[in-house]
Image: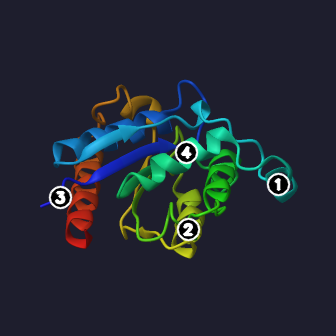
Amino acid sequence: MITPKILAFAGSTRKDSFNKRLAKVALHAAEQAGAETTFIDLLDYNMPLYSKDLFDEQGMPGGVIEFKEMLKSHNGFLIASPEYNGSLTGTLKNAIDWATIKAKGEERMACWDGKIAGLVSASPGSLGGIRGLHHLRTILAGIGTFVLPNHLAVSNSETNLQNDIQITDEKLQHQVDTLATEIVRVVRRLH
């Protein structure tokens, strides 16, 4: 039986992002379920706004290459997506767009095709950022990523996300544990 490799990241660059915290909570749960886990911060990867002209003139930016290598080296992703105006953040969309660009000698969609993704979001509001997850699900499915059917939106994040290990609300923590266990189970079954 393989040990699933799960990568977690958030679509936020804010230092004290609740979505970064939620990504770490979900990743901790995946580790408890038997996965080898890695957390990355998109802020650590220099990814300018995608432009075909930029790519044609300067090639793949170094930060994009590093981000793509992280994606390719993992079986699945736990993505915490803040909701900006009813959708995902520009930061997250830009990272996804760059990671779909085929480098020389690379298979098309090598970062996304056949990968498994679990989606979560957090917000201080009562909806927990859930409206943006639909758009993210559509994008990922369109590039070959199998998105788990269940997702999690953590509302009242200022109260519920006090640390990087667990959610204060036991029912929400159970849901994140279930999602993490499911991504580990699906990766094991498919690989």
Disc 1 secondary structure class: loop
Q: How far apart are marks 3 and 4 (CA)?
A: 23 Å
Would you name the residue on which mark 4 appears?
67
Instruction: Give SS at disc 3.
Output: loop
Q: Which numbered dot is residue 109?
A: 2
Please tell me the numbered disc located at residue 51: 1
Q: Is residue 45 left or right of residue 25?
A: right
Q: Distance between the Cα atoms at labels 4 and 1?
A: 17 Å
Percent position (x, y) of residue 170? Answer: 23, 42
Residue 169, compared with residue 98, is above or below; it is above
Amino acid residing under circle 3: Ile
Question: Callout 4, which amino acid?
Answer: Phe
**Dot 2 lies on which element?**
loop
In the picture shown, does residue 156 fall above or below 72? Answer: above
88 relative position to 166: left or right? right
Q: Which quadrant of the view contains residue 150?
A: bottom left
Residue at mark 2 to residue at mark 1: CA–CA distance: 18 Å
